Image (tube, rainbow, N blue to C red):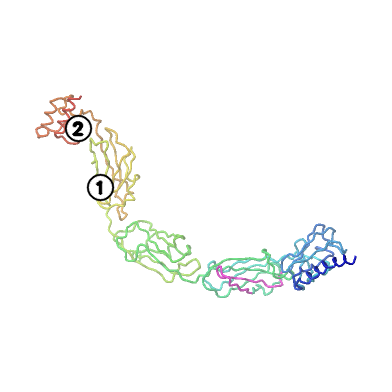
Amino acid sequence: MKRMRKWLLCPLIVVALLLCAIPAYADTPTMPHAFYGTLTIAGSPAAVGTVVTAKVNDVECGSITTTVAGQYGGSGAFDPKLSVTGDIDNGDTIYFYAGGEVANQTYAFSAGAVTELNLVVTEDLDPPLVDLTPLSPDPTNDNTPTFTGTAIDTLSNIASVEYQVGTGSWRVWVEATATDGAFDSPSESYTFTIPALADGGYTVYVRATDAASPPNTTAEENHASDSFTIDTVAPTVVSRYPASGAINVPVGAVVTATFSEAMSASTITTSSFTLKIGTTPVSGSVSYNAGTYTATFTPAADLAEDTTYTASLTTAITDVAGNALAASSTWSFSTGEFAAPTVISTSPASDAIEVAVGAMITATFSEAMDESTITNSSFTVAGISGSVSYNSVTYTATFNPASNLAYETIYTASLSTAITDASGTPLASTYSWSFTTEAESTVIPGDANGDGFVNALDITKVERIIVGLDAETLGADANEDGSVNALDITMVEIIIAYP
């Protein structure tokens, strides 16, 4: 019996040695702090099913649901309780919420403690809502912009503002000021002025707290934000059309000015952007393209030929931030003398007859033309479709019918005043001409003498035509190569031999 006790003792000694090897400083979980007690909301016992939660540093650390009206948890050793646990230090303040509202009571965390704490929720204690409205435009040319807003609650603590540069991390909390000097009434208005800022994009953030709200709240409903841009740089004119000193400007030209940045369209008017001949204003309209930063003055009628014009932009023109042009801008240009282009020849000629059905229709102009204006809309042939091209070397436009013309048909070709020369001057008037196509051929190839037969007499006729004794006849070109020559004699012989 003693021997058996000795063997039983050995394992116990080993276990004891292993336990001694565990470090004394090993981490142990924080013991929870348990709570129970009565729960009153707005003067009445809380209803069954009301959720009670605990938060430390705005992090939820425990919750319980009431099963008895007006009471959460129980005092008995085995009754459920509100267990508060987590990454909490002794002494941290616990905030209690019932039905989403914060209770009047708080408690200092004590690991392992069990505390009876009667909770009372007296009113809606959500953090106050805030509104934010910049007093200055966005963007602004004032680098110390003032903002105003409304805190929709009774405040005992001032509102705060946070601002940052672009997407950077520089942030400064600035104290706001109540408009009447104190945050002490519902819908209290407030103002604040941001310290001097460099040009750039900013976002301003506002948050508000009141006496009953826990500090350091992150609830989104008590934040407001707005973005704005500081711009104190005066805009400049980067390009003009016509350029300063330009000559031979087309009479159909419009006048444009392109700026260095986005401009305020409302400041670009017929008063701030003008065109004059000497001191006489030119009537016209003004527009602005926000995509290209370009202002356009469109004269009410074509400009006069061989005339000097002066365009002007005043400092009443501003960018979207309100910065005026760095300086007024004035420049001059001159138009040229532009006679209307004319049509000097056509093919077929006007009133031509016997025009080949495979012919193309052409018109040659007196000067270089604007190719983009010569299209199948401005160059047409009535009754047929086709394609249009332009030869810039010969100044010739060509209408190529999509198929052969019809026999013995009158066609009318037209050139409209949409066609202009290279300077933009249109044809003086629509130009039209007509021609008639050939009759369908009944000629027998090789029948040089026109007697209706191809025989040896036709050989003699071809010979006489070749040496100039007779005029050319329709059937003499037996091989249809476009001319009458010895090859046609051979072809007549072949036709005779192999009719």
Side of 325 relative to 277 (left or right): right
State the residue at coordinates (27%, 53%): 368
Q: Which of 321 and 451 is in front in this view?
A: 451
Above or below, 362 relative to 14: above
Q: Which of 28 and 153 is in front in this view?
A: 28
- Asked whether 332 falls inside the magenta stretch, the response is no
Q: Which of marks 1 and 2 is nearer the N terminus?
A: 1
Residue 226 horizontal/vertical position (percent) = 59, 66
Residue 276 horizontal/vertical position (percent) = 36, 64
Q: Residues within 10 Å of mark 2 (few under 14, many from 20)?
A: some
Tell me the magenta residue range. 154-174
Q: Name the residue under label 2.
A: 479
Element carrying mark 2 = loop
Q: What's under tag 1, amino acid-wise?
A: Thr
As drawn, the label of residue 364 is: 1
Side of 353 relative to 82 (left or right): left
State the residue at coordinates (55%, 68%): 166
Would you identify the image quadrant in which residue 36 lies? Answer: bottom right
Q: What's under tag 2, amino acid-wise?
A: Asn
Side of 409 relative to 35 (left or right): left
Q: How crowded is mark 1: few (under 14 residues within 10 Å), some or many (20 or more)?
A: some
Q: Residue furthest right?
A: 1
Element carrying mark 1 = strand
As drawn, the label of residue 209 is: none
Q: In which quarter of the image is the N terminus?
A: bottom right
Side of 43 relative to 457 (left or right): right
